[in-house]
Image (spheres, grey):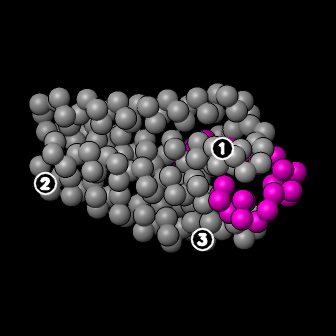
Amino acid sequence: MRIPIIWGNSICILGCAFAVCLVAIAPDVNEVSLRLLLYLVAWASLVVFPHCLAHFVVGRSVGIRFSNYSIAHSSIVKLRMPVVSAVAAKAPVLTLNIEKGSLRTTSRGRRAAMFASGAAASVIFPFFVAVSSLSHLPTDLSFLLFILSTANLVFDFYYSPKAGDLSRILVA
């Protein structure tokens, strides 16, 4: 299924804006469990939505063009980790498709910056939620968000060079 660039970027921007709105309204929610839920949804949104948008922004700034977005399965499936791969095989993800010609004419360093940007965005932005929660959640719950963010970072350090964005730097 081909999704025009404008629609894919709009989905990513709206997803990021949704996360920021959740973080902004969470402190005003009286029930701690609901407040935590808002932070968790914002956290998950900031793992997913900035990823392709970062590829697009960095890619366009270094001369890489993109043809469209599509819905695909995560390359996490390639890890062949029993539970993780099974979940990834069923979860659709928004994918940004590169115009191969522009990738071939771009320097290795610029390609590396474009590929690394998605991984970087997916591991950096969730920490924003953890930091934002510090004065609005009990310490142990904010600590949980930091643990999730750190686990996401560690997993990406393992996954990305094997089957994710960082592995594409070597291939492209």
In-image side of 69 versus 104 (left or right):
left
Q: Residue at x 61, y 71 (%)?
A: 162
Label at residue 139: 2
Residue 172 position, x and y percent, is: 77, 64
* Foreground label between 2 and 1: 1
Mark 3 → mark 1, Cα distance in angstroms? 20 Å
In-image side of 36 versus 168 (left or right):
left
Q: Quadrant of residue 7?
A: top right
Give the secondary structure at mark 1. helix
Query: Nearest the camera: 158 or 116?
Result: 116
Query: Nearest the camera: 130 or 73?
Result: 130
- Residue kind at label 3, given as amino acid type: Pro
Residue that numbered label 3 is attached to: 161
N-terminal of the pair, mark 3 or mark 1, is 1
N-terminal of the pair, mark 2 or mark 3, is 2
Q: Residue at x 29, y 61 (%)?
A: 147
Q: Residue at x 41, y 31 (%)?
A: 18
Q: Residues within 10 Å of mark 1 (few under 14, many from 20)?
A: many
Give the secondary structure at mark 2. helix
- Residue kind at label 2, given as amino acid type: Thr
Residue that numbered label 1 is attached to: 56
Q: What segment carries the magenta color?
A: 91-115
Residue 156 position, x and y percent, is: 49, 64
